[in-house]
Amino acid sequence: MTNPSTTAPPERAPAPDTAALVVRAKEPVAEGVVSLTLARPDGGRLPDWTPGSHIDLVLPGGSTRQYSLCGDRWDPYTYRIAVLREPHGRGGSAEVHDRLAVGDPVGVGGPRNNFPQAPAPGFLFIAGGIGITPLLPMIRQAELLGTEWTLLYGGRTRASMAFAADLAEAHGDRVHLAPEDEYGLLDLDSWLSRPLPDHKVYCCGPAPLLTAVARACAHWPPHSLRTERFTATATATALAAPAHLAPFEVELRRTGRTVTVTPGASVLQALRGAGVDLLSSCEQGTCGTCLTTVLDGIPDHRDSVLADHQRAANDCMLPCVSRSRGDRLVLDL
């Protein structure tokens, strides 16, 4: 779920197949947050991943949700994620908290990385709430390489901030915890008023935090800030009417089928209606799970993942939200 201003391209989604894993451990790590450890039933090796990666968790109830990997990337046999209970969500987090148990099977798609950690002499990590999860492997990577780093971590209360105590104990004054009920909102102007030479700022959290950090970093060198978001940007969600208002056709090159997309349906919905099984997660254009190669035609990009140069290339799209600028698109499906 990245800001389109980031320059690193998201990894292409693999085939829509998901691996069958089981829940090896489930434990609370903060108020309203549980950690899941996932593994293969036979104890076999899992695909490698890099800091910033996420997986798509296919729950027994059938829903698919995206969660950042926050465990040890050098452990080839387990994945670890942390799930915040969302009282007003779509039900996925409630299923994880209330019904998913140790030993239950789950499907996993990925891992894939829309929020890669670029090499830099130093990092300022800024987390809001559950946004700490993708930053944990980045901190470990910086520690491994002996790179300078600092973490500014805010949340509603100290008890609601997952992994906060462990981070403070392990890293001392590199970690600055700022629960809102104790300190108010994060003092971003103080932290970001002076650009740090050659530093990258990595930020993940709720949309108001990302907006505030982007504003405070406006005077930093280009591409200093990289963000991951949970919801679509206002630019993506508040776009004017689609560029092409009439129905259009989508040709599926691998199968030779053609699907008609009407103005009231997304490309993803039309594909599913035709029996095409394409893995997706957020269905808001923020996670990159359904990223699909475009072989011909010009997409009407309406996502919050792709960078400007990727959109200009017109060789991929997110069919959950993006459409066509013409009468026809050809996809590698």
Image: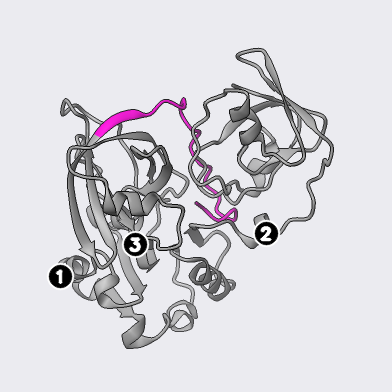
> Do labels 2 and 1 touch, CB within 8 Å?
no
Where residue 271 sits in the image (x, y, percent)? 62, 28
Looking at the rendered image, the quarter that the C terminus falls into is top right
Instruction: Choose between 63 and 318: the one closer to the eye.
Output: 63
Residue where numbered disc 3 is placed? 132
Colour basis: one colour
Q: Is residue 186 above or below residue 165?
A: below
Residue 302 inside the magenta-drawn segment: no
**Element type where label 3 sits in the image:** helix
Residue where numbered disc 2 is placed? 235
User: What residue is drawn where x is 18% and y is 37%?
Assistant: 103
Which callout, 2 or 3, points at the residue further toward the start of the chain? 3
**Element type where label 2 sits in the image:** helix
Q: Nearer the viewer, mark 2 or mark 1?
A: 2
User: What residue is drawn where x is 66% and y is 12%?
Assistant: 256
> Do labels 2 and 3 touch, CB within 8 Å?
no
Q: Main secondary structure of the magenta part?
A: loop
Residue where numbered disc 1 is placed? 169
Mark 1 is on which residue type? Glu
Hey, which quadrant is residue 297 in on the image? top right
Q: Is residue 221 above or below residue 98?
A: below
Horizontal relation, residue 269 to residue 66: left or right: right
Q: Is residue 253 above or below residue 194?
A: above
Question: Where does the magenta region start and end?
Answer: 1-21
